[in-house]
Amino acid sequence: MRVLVADDDALSRKILEESLNHWGYEPVIAKDGDEAWDMLKEDGGPTLVILDWVMPGMEGIEVCRKVRARNTVNYFYIILLSAKNSHYDVIKGLESGADDYIIKPFHSEELRSRLKIGQRIIELEKRILCLASTDYLTALLNRRAFIERMEAEINRVTREKKSLGIVIADLDYFKSVNDTYGHQAGDLVLQEFSRLLCSSFRIYDFIGRYGGEEFIVGLPGASAEVSGAIAERVRRRFEEHRTLIPEWDAGIGVTSSFGVAAMENGQPELSIDGLIKQADAALYQAKQQGRNQVKIFRT
Ligand SMILES: [Mg+2]
């Protein structure tokens, strides 16, 4: 795990850098508060931070306040390190937004233990974020996470004048699977279909569970034709597939229907809702015309 260290004292920096390396962390070094703040503003930078309080330019507690004021998605765990050692200083440091406060000269093993606390908090936060965006049964994105990702992609492809394909898939007569074989069998079918989606779409496509037996895929850079072709491949593979239900000693076959739409490059911007409505309309058509087929939305 990377750890940002900001200290204006060269010797202090060297000791911290060597200790961190020794403990298996990857130190990222800043010589003062301004440099640290620049690094903390960057996307994907370190989120575990050791800040010296007194530095020329921006001081450690000011960096703390600025980090907290930004209200980012990722949590920054900040340890203030300072020779200021009165209770008043410790309180002021923690009130600026620091998670922990260590008085210099620091005890090496104590710093190590306190860093472990920070690491635990950051890893816990990552796990929570992951759980909050994942569908429990299929491990695909949940609906909210899919829409968030879609929002980011739609902005990007609009800016870059690229295409964005969307596929909505729905299992045919799924209710009868649950009714006949039970919900556990239904869950198995959903899981196998999810796996098939993951292995059939491209690595940069993103896949979500949209509702009960409804799935949704975003395909950056893909036209409606390309999206439709991949959907057709999934449809055929699933049609041939049998899901083994151990309790029934049986393999059941389920088919799937697909609606496809795309925001093609150069086309006027569509909202996410608009794009999903188009794919939904195509899916409705596929269902109406007998299911087990792929339909592409045509204006
Ligand atoms: Mg200093």
Image (spheres, rainbow, N blue to C red):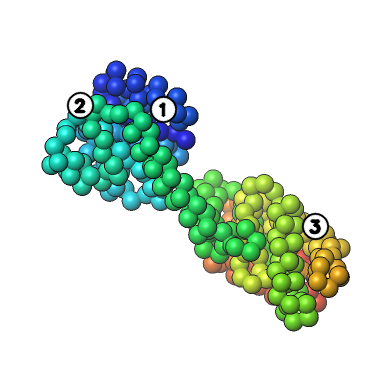
Q: Residue drawn 47% across and 35% down?
A: 1
Q: Residues within 10 Å of mark 2 (few under 14, many from 20)?
A: few
Q: Residue drawn 56% across and 64% down?
A: 143
108 horizontally vs 189: left or right: left
Q: Residue drawn 86% across and 70% down?
A: 249
Vertical side of 4 occupied by 165: above or below = below
Numbered label attached to residue 233: 3
- Picture quarter containing residue 19? top left
Numbered label attached to residue 20: 1
Task: Please tell me whether mark 2 sits on a helix, a strand or a loop.
Answer: loop
Q: Residues within 10 Å of mark 3 (few under 14, many from 20)?
A: some
- Camera-near label (1 vs 3) is 1
Can residue 127 be spotted in the picture?
A: yes
| Quadrant location of the C terminus in the rendered image | bottom right
Name which residue type carries label 3. Arg
Task: Please tell me whether mark 3 sits on a helix, a strand or a loop.
Answer: helix
Name which residue type carries label 2. Pro
Numbered label attached to residue 56: 2
298 horizontally vs 17: left or right: right
Vertical side of 207 occupied by 43: above or below = above
Numbered label attached to residue 91: none
